[in-house]
Image (tube, rainbow, N blue to C red):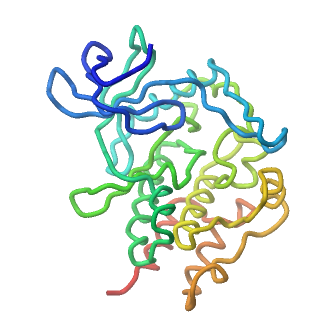
Amino acid sequence: MSIVPGTVLLQRYRVLRHLRREGLGEVFSAEDASTGRRVAVKVLGDPPERLDPTKVLGAPERMAKAEAAARFGHEAIACARLRGPHTLPSLDGGEDPEHGPLIVFELREGELLGDRLARQGPIPFSVLHPLVEQLWLALAELHEMGIVHRDISSMKVLVDRGPDGERVTLLDLGSCKLPPALCDEEPSVSDRRLGDIRFVPPEQLGDAKAVDHRADLYAATTVVFQALTGELPYAARNLMMLADLKTRTAPRRLGTMMPPPVDRRLEVFVNRGLAHNPDRRFAGIADALEGWRALRPTA
């Protein structure tokens, strides 16, 4: 049964409209009948299709339903523990008799960073700097709990109007890696299907289960590169070539992709975040945040 405006979920949340597809599910704006509050409800939909660069290009493979359900459950576990202003803590959740598992969040409506880049092109550094600082803060919250996102991209970053200006929210924990304290084991997975290949680090192409927090630092730095240049660190004709380039060659240099002059310190920062070897990246999120704050534009 499809979800349309007027559908009531969990006998409480009346759907107003569809907002977006997000990872494992569809997100709707809804009204809480008990309070009148507007909320966002994410419902587990059909398992997403993922492109595997090691297989025939153009032939997407659909995630197994059991894996999708398990990952949705992990997302619910993670979101129940979030508290920060740049992530989305869950407000409620459960199993609707007709529509299956769902998670209820605070309603935030804005524009995905990837859509903004497609619409207007690169973002000036002075505008981008506070947005990326908020992205690092979102990651800090996750990493402090031992959670690795594993699927950061510009389409997982929502920009809306917060109390102090533009606000960044990191979305979609459907591919997250939880610490042992929060789960018994990770769902079975075809490792290469986790994350957007354009943003994930080289090590995640081979073994997504084994990656640590440094994979998120690489992916977030890729977002920075894209936001500054309008392009990605690697240019490839297809996914197979992209995977090969990521495992064998260095990314394009930021200084060749932006109008001069380019701050050398910014180039060094991006180069470090995109290092092929995880040991050469930032030691942790505190290191990245400190380095990014040191680049803050002067008035």
**Quadrant in which the N terminus appears:** top left
Apparent side of residue 289 relative to residue 66 in the rendered image (left or right): left
Residue at 68 percent of width and 46 percent of height:
211
Comparing 11 with 288, the one in front is 11
Residue at point 36% right, 32% down? 28
Depth check: 3 or 253 in front?
A: 3
Query: x%, y% of residue 85?
Result: 32, 50
- Residue 59 image offset from top left, x and y in percent: 77, 36
Q: Please state the horizontal and vertical placement of residue 130, each as a whole percent of the image.
A: 38, 69
Q: Residue furthest bottom?
A: 261
Query: In front: 142, or 127?
Result: 127
Residue 232 drawn above or below residue 48:
below
Q: Is residue 290 left or right of residue 35?
A: right
Quarter of the rendering occupied by the C terminus: bottom left
The image quadrant that residue 258 belongs to is bottom right
Q: Going by the picture, which residue comes out furthest to the top?
A: 97
In this orientation, which residue lies closer to the viewer: 189 or 116?
116
The residue at the point 58 percent across, 75 percent down is: 269
Count of numbered badges drawn on the protein: 0
Residue 159 position, x and y percent, is 37, 56
Residue most extreme to the left: 35
Q: Is residue 112 above or below residue 43?
A: below
User: Does 111 sit left or right of 238 as displayed?
Assistant: left
Q: Is residue 289 above or below residue 42?
A: below
Q: Report which quarter residue 277 is drawn in.
A: bottom right
